[in-house]
Image (cartoon, coloured by chain):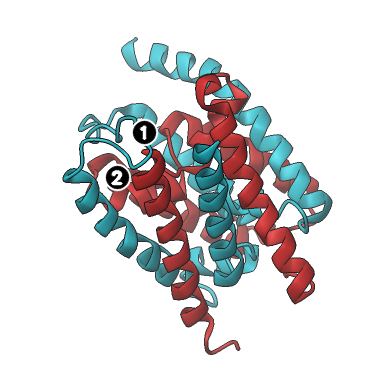
């Protein structure tokens, strides 16, 4: 129960951060990606601001054996890159640019995103369901 | 208000980072939106489903309350359904193939100097930038 409470709290802070930073506004996200247009630097401040407390948290995590509520802390990052990381990130970036939405803000704006926000979320879920099948195809191509 | 956008961005970013720090140190998990949702969609996260749903409830619930308190929120989501569907499918497939999105690879990955996080972020930023050049400036569709 207490795990769920802290998960809820993390999600709430995440949502509040996305709301006040303006990252639920697709125009600001597309404005950041549009370096040849009316460039909007806000996203750099959001990412920079988010990395700061997280960098400290990773240093603290290094000195701990378990999480505060028990259980393992995440394993060290996988050093292998692999084709799926690159292909997936390119596909994700394309979708991110097209609509100005990524998974966090898409969730956060569910209550006020209208039919467009809902259609995006549904399409994203369909994409997630289909991803393992596409991964198998890409792996087959990569090893062929 | 407009001139202070960067300040709101920084403040919001600090909140997002604090949320991720809390989830890491207290629950021992990485706050990556696509992974949290994806694990529920494909069943790989069934063992931790309650925790995932609780996080998503906060992620949806607080902006809902915020919007109630502050009034209408500008989302400027495109009204072109074809663009929305294409974008959603690309984001869904892409984040699962890459095993992460802006929060997982960007915020949580870069902050621990993960090579995967840095490489992913470079590629999705480049792809997003190229889409803006192609679809906004050359084709004028978005």
Residue B48 visible in the picture: yes
Q: Given contact means CB atoms under 8 Å apart, are the residues at marks 2 and 1 in contact?
A: yes
* Chain rendered red: B
Q: Position of residue A132 (x, y in %)?
A: 52, 18
User: Of residues A61 and A50, which is closer to you in this image?
Assistant: A61
Residue B75 visible in the picture: no
Q: Which residue is mark 2?
A: B119
**Which residue: 52% across, 61% down?**
B133
Q: Is residue A117 left or right of residue A72?
A: right
Dot 1 crowding, Cα within 10 Å, few <14, some 14–19, many 20+:
many
Q: Position of residue B60 (x, y in %)?
A: 67, 51
Q: Position of residue B44 (x, y in %)?
A: 51, 19
Say which element carries label 2.
helix
Q: Which residue is mark 1?
A: A85
Q: Is residue A80 left or right of residue B39?
A: left
What is the chain letter for disc 2? B
Can you say whether A143 is above or below B55 in the image? above
* Chain rendered cyan: A
């Amino acid at each position: 129960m207490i795990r769920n409470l802290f998960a809820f709290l993390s999600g709430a802070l995440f949502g509040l951060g996305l709301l006040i930073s303006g990252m639920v506004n697709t125009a600001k996200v597309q404005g950041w990606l549009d370096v040849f247009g009316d460039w909007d630097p806000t996203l750099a401040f959001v990412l920079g601001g988010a990395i700061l407390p997280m960098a400290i948290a990773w240093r603290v995590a290094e000195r701990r054996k378990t999480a505060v509520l028990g259980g393992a802390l995440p394993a060290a990052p996988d050093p292998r890159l692999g084709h799926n990381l690159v292909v997936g990130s390119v596909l994700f970036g394309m979708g991110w640019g097209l609509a100005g939405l990524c998974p966090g803000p898409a969730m956060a704006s569910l209550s006020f995103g209208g039919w467009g926000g809902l259609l995006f979320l549904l399409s994203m879920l369909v994409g997630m369901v289909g991803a393992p099948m596409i991964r198998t195809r890409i792996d087959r191509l990569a090893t062929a | 208000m407009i001139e202070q956008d960067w300040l709101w961005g920084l403040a919001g970013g600090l909140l997002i980072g604090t949320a991720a720090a809390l989830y890491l140190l207290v629950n021992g998990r990485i706050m990556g939106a696509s992974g949290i949702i994806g694990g529920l969609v494909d069943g790989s996260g069934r063992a931790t489903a309650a925790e995932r749903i609780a996080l998503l409830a906060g992620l949806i619930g607080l902006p809902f309350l915020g919007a109630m308190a502050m009034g209408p929120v500008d989302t400027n989501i495109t009204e072109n359904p074809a663009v929305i569907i294409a974008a959603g499918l690309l984001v869904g497939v892409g984040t699962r193939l890459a095993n992460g999105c802006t929060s997982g690879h960007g915020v949580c990955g870069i902050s621990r100097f993960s090579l995967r996080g840095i490489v992913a972020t470079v590629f999705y930023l480049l792809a997003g930038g190229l889409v803006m050049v192609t679809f906004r400036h050359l084709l004028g569709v978005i």
